Amino acid sequence: RACSWQNDVFVVAEPGQLADKFLRSVRFSLLSTIRNRKEMSKFNHISNISDLVAYRPFFQIGCIVHRYIGRQTQVMEDDSEIGAYMFRRTVPSMHLTADDVRWMVGAWRDRIVICTG
């Protein structure tokens, strides 16, 4: 069996509840990657999605990789702005269980196997 990936486009409108939830998820995911105080200081100043993509235009939440691809801004009648941030998501189309891996071990003999997780 070969593992494959699927790509789609995910759009988050800010301001909004989805944007707040998305930002919390990304911040939680990125927190473990902070290595020093300088980077922590930059990380602490992320308060919206614009700050996020300026800090890091690609990131992973769980097993899904997000890459920032653009933004569209709509100006409302009251001069407020709504930003639509677009991300290309790369999602594994298959997840291997422990039994799958045990079944495939023979096929991997004399091959280089790269595993990330």
Image: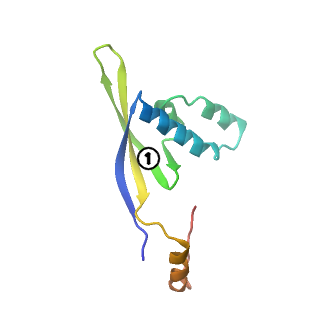
On the image, the x and y values in percent for residue 62 come to 52, 53
In this view, 114 is above or below 110: above
On the image, the x and y values in percent for residue 72 come to 33, 32
Check the image and name the residue furthest to the left.
Answer: 77
Q: Would residue 13 be found to the left or right of residue 50 on screen?
A: left
In this view, 108 is above or below 98: below
SS state under label 1: strand
The image quadrant that residue 84 belongs to is top left
The quarter in which the C terminus is drawn is: bottom right
Q: Would residue 4 be found to the left or right of residue 36 on screen?
A: left
Q: Would residue 41 be found to the left or right of residue 97 on screen?
A: right
Residue drawn at the location 48% of the way across and 33% of the way down:
20
Q: Would residue 79 be found to the left or right of residue 39 on screen?
A: left
> Is residue 53 in view from this perspective?
no
Check the image and name the residue furthest to the top.
Answer: 78
In this view, 7 is above or below 103: above
On the image, the x and y values in percent for residue 33 come to 63, 46
On the image, the x and y values in percent for residue 7 come to 36, 55
In this view, 62 is above or below 99: above
Residue drawn at the location 36% of the way across and 25% of the way down:
82
Q: Which residue is mark 1?
A: 67
The quarter in which the N terminus is drawn is: bottom left
At label 1, the amino acid type is Arg
Residue drawn at the location 53% of the way across and 42% of the way down:
26
